[in-house]
Image (cartoon, grey):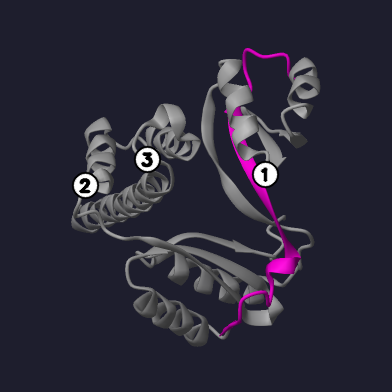
Amino acid sequence: MGRAFEFRKERKMKRWAGMAKTFTRIGREIALAVKAGGPNQEYNSRLRMAIQNAKSANMPKSNVESAIKKASGKEAENFQEVLYEGKGPHGIAIMVETATDNPTRTLANVRMHFDRCGGALGTSGSVVFLFDHKGVFKVKSEGHDWDELELELIDAGLEEMKREEDEVVLYSTFTDFGTMQKALEDRNIEVNSAGLEWIPNATKKVGDTEAEQVIKLIDRLEEDDDVLNVFHTMDMSE
């Protein structure tokens, strides 16, 4: 009974920690969106995207409103977007998106994570050419004729569409992100999540032991409060 209780307690604490990290990340995305385009989501597609992602993550509406208000105020934290590039163990290329109010601290932390996990932080441009920057929209598949919609969305910048079990993943170019977002809104297509991602143009297969070493680095980076997203070239297929 005691061990079972402790196990359930530990799992609950991990779940809460993961939720807190997600809310922190979305809060910073909201802050960056407000800084870039103002607090009115009607005229700020990036803010609409962040709010939609908050809903998908079950972030309370009060938290979202508080984040927008805080980012709009005179004492708003001055977050900056900083992109780091490096190589993980076994030559896996890694891109790290951060939002920070202290770039010196963030640089030191990211470098430490790479060093301690057998990787090396690189310079700007060292691995970015191995990725394509794309808009990625995950939408509910039911209730739509996707054969017809695929043709319509090509005009909005659709480059690729992948159908999965209960959702459809749509890819656009970086520059067509806003156009694609509006096209989905105009057609009342519910978006589960949306964002700009660094998609590897080629992946590398490694063994189980090597993969664990790479995943250890990715986990450490993702646990850092300043890190928004981590992208890599490791082949994650079975």
Q: CA distance from mark 1 to mark 3?
A: 20 Å
The disc, 1 or 3, on the residue closer to the chain's N-terminal end is 3
Residue 57 versus residue 80 in the image, above or below: above
The disc, 2 or 3, on the residue closer to the chain's N-terminal end is 3
Name the amino acid type tagged 1: Thr
Front residue of 183 and 87: 183
Residue 220 lies in what quarter of the image? bottom left
In the rendered image, residue 162, in percent from the top left (x then y), is placed at 74, 35
Q: Which mark is residue 221?
A: none
Q: Are marks 2 and 3 in contact (CB under 8 Å)?
A: no
Q: Are marks 1 and 3 in contact (CB under 8 Å)?
A: no
Q: Please state the total of marks drawn on the protein image.
A: 3
Look at 50% across and 87% down and name the residue there: 115
Residue 144 versus residue 82 in the image, above or below: above
Look at 52% across and 81% down and name the residue there: 114
Q: Which mark is residue 73?
A: 2
Q: Which residue is mark 3?
A: 38
Magenta residue span: 120-146
Residue 237 versus residue 45 in the image, above or below: below
Look at 21% across and 47% down and name the residue there: 73
Specify whether 218 is left or right of 175. Answer: left
Mark 1, secondary structure of its residue: loop
Specify whether 53 is left or right of 145. Answer: left
Front residue of 205 and 78: 78
Q: Which residue is mark 1?
A: 175
Mark 2, secondary structure of its residue: loop
Name the amino acid type tagged 3: Gly
